[in-house]
Amino acid sequence: MSTKEISLLLYPNNISNQKNDYYAQVRYVGTITNNDIADLMIAEGSEYHKESIIDILTRCDRIKMEKLAEGYKINTELFQSHLSVKGHFNASSGSVDPDEHQVKLKFSATKRMRELLTKSKFRILGLANTKPIIGRVIDLTTQSENKLITPGQVLQIEGKRLKIIGDDPSVGVYLIDQKSNERIKCKQVIGNEPQKLLILLPNLQSGKYLLEVCTQFAMNRKLVSTTLSTSFHLPLYVK
């Protein structure tokens, strides 16, 4: 069994006072599903049909889940799993409060899996992009995508790390008039999530605009001390 090189990206450690202090996260190659596992098994020479393999894998997953929920431990070549319960109990009452007592599922790697990980090689790719990313802009009035926007109506901005948060005065969403370079701040944010913003557009004159998002929101829902900003790569137009 061979292992390929695992790529790492570095992120600033915002809770550290030391300079050049970063933590690493794996840059994942992709996600493997039962369908993908079936294809890999066939490529290795399995004589079973793909539908049969998927059926076996699906049944296996279901049985494991059912038995864990019944209080069994699960031991496989990949992991060991069991249930645990968090919360404080009163021995005299003998009752369980679903709001206080939470059932947790614990996983731990097997010895064989841990030995395989020791053979893995790692490569640091460099600093990760922690800035907000704008992927798509939709005018909810006209459904125009990445082009026309309607003054006074709602604009949907989709992407990553977009949540508008922070004490810096520059935090917010802006439309920059490409003719006069005037920065017009959108004062009403009616939907504020990391992957989607809903903005009530101000009254804009006809012309071409650049969309910009400024925030102190970063990875793992933490705040950074300096403002992070990004601009949409396409101009937006008001008729």
Image (cartoon, grey):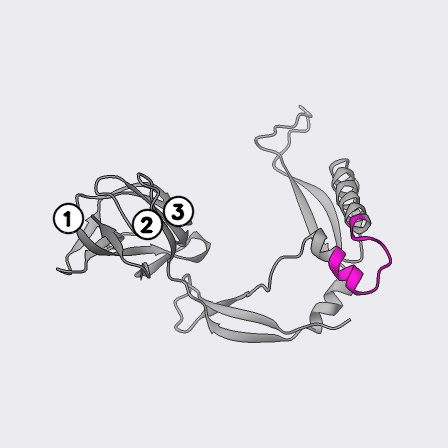
**Vertical position of residue 195 compared to residue 109: above or below:** above
* Mark before the other along the chain sequence, 2 or 1: 2
State which quadrant residue 168 falls in. Answer: bottom left
Q: What residue type is labelled 1?
A: Gln
Q: Residue furthest front?
A: 239
Amino acid residing under circle 3: Lys
- Taking the spot 74% from the left edge, 45% from the top edge, the residue there is 82
How far apart marks 3 and 1 lie (CA) works out to: 25 Å
Choose mark 3 or mark 2, whichever is in front.
3
- Counting residues from the N terminus, which is met first, the one under dot 3 or under dot 2? 2
Inspect the image, locate mark 2, and give the three-letter code of the amino acid beneath it. Answer: Ile
The one nearer the camera, 199 or 136, is: 136
Q: Residues within 10 Å of mark 2 (few under 14, many from 20)?
A: some
- In the figure, 119 relative to 144: above or below? below
Q: Residue 196, which numbered label?
A: 3
Q: Which residue is drawn at 32% across and 49% down?
A: 164
Front one among 171 and 118: 171
Q: Where is residue 219 in the image (x, y as percent from the top left)?
A: 44, 57
The x and y percentages for residue 209 are 22, 56
Q: Which residue is drawn at 40% across and 70% down?
A: 18
Q: Give the range drawn in magenta.
A: 38-51
Task: Give left or right: position of 8 versus 218.
Answer: right
Q: Do the numbered discs 3 and 2 sit on residues whose CB atoms are within 8 Å?
A: no
Element under disc 3:
strand
> Which disc number belongs to residue 165?
2
Q: Residues within 10 Å of mark 1 (few under 14, many from 20)?
A: few
**Is label 2 in a helix, a strand or a loop?**
loop
Above or below, comparing residue 45 to residue 142 in the picture? below
Q: Does the magenta stretch include residue 43?
A: yes
Q: Residue under circle 1?
A: 205
